[in-house]
């Protein structure tokens, strides 16, 4: 899917450079990126010998959502 307008507010998307992804369509009003094609998701649960879990937040994708 190729987003031209924001599916939340309906405004035309701008382009913004995000991390190593290059120019991504981005809604300035909603503060959200929209990628043209869905990427595969890889999840890994890392637990050490003390049963502590490693969590990773990718800040360049979203400042308010876990990635």
Image (cartoon, helix red, strand yellow):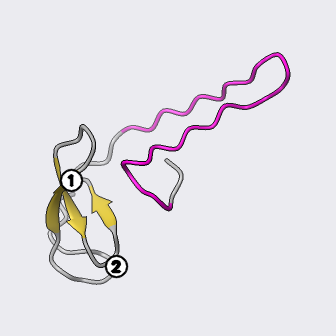
- Per the image, the residue denoted by label 2 is 8
Residue 7 located left or right of residue 11: right
* Quarter occupied by the N terminus: bottom left
Q: Which residues are magenta?
A: 40-64
Check residue 36 in the rendering and tell me which mark sits there, or answer none: 1
Q: From the top left corner, tell me how far across and down residue 65 is, in percent.
A: 51, 58
- The number of numbered badges drawn on the structure is 2
Residue occupying the point 25% across, 71% down = 27
In the rendered view, would you say 28 is above or below 15? below
How many other residues sit within 10 Å of disc 1, few (<14), some (14-19) or many (≥20)? few
Q: Residue furthest top?
A: 49
Q: CA distance from mark 2 to mark 1?
A: 16 Å
Q: From the top left corner, tell me how far across and down residue 47 is, in percent.
A: 74, 24
Check residue 57 in the rendering and tell me which mark sits there, or answer none: none
Question: In what element is the residue under mark 1?
Answer: loop
How many other residues sit within 10 Å of disc 2, few (<14), some (14-19) or many (≥20)? few
- Whether pointer 2 and pointer 1 mark residues with C-beta atoms closer than 8 Å, the reply is no
Q: From the top left corner, tell me how far across and down residue 13 is, in percent.
A: 17, 71
Residue occupying the point 76% across, 19% down = 48
Q: Residue furthest right?
A: 50
Q: Main secondary structure of the magenta part?
A: loop
In the rendered view, would you say 8 is above or below 64? below
Residue occupying the point 23% across, 41% down = 21
Residue occupying the point 65% across, 29% down = 45
Viewer-proximal residue among 35 and 66 = 66
Q: Quadrant of residue 11?
A: bottom left
Q: Quadrant of residue 62?
A: bottom left
In the rendered view, would you say 39 is above or below 29? above
Q: From the top left corner, tell me how far across and down residue 50 is, in percent.
A: 85, 21
Look at the image and say whether residue 43 sits in the magenta stretch.
yes
In the rendered view, would you say 28 is above or below 56? below
Look at the image and say whether residue 5 sits in the magenta stretch.
no
């Amino acid at each position: 899917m190729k987003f031209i307008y924001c599916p939340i507010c309906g405004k035309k998307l701008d382009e913004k450079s995000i991390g190593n992804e290059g120019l991504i369509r981005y809604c300035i009003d909603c503060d959200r990126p929209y990628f043209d094609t869905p990427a595969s998701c890889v999840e890994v649960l890392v637990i050490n010998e003390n049963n502590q879990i490693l969590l990773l937040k990718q800040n360049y994708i979203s400042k308010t959502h876990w990635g």
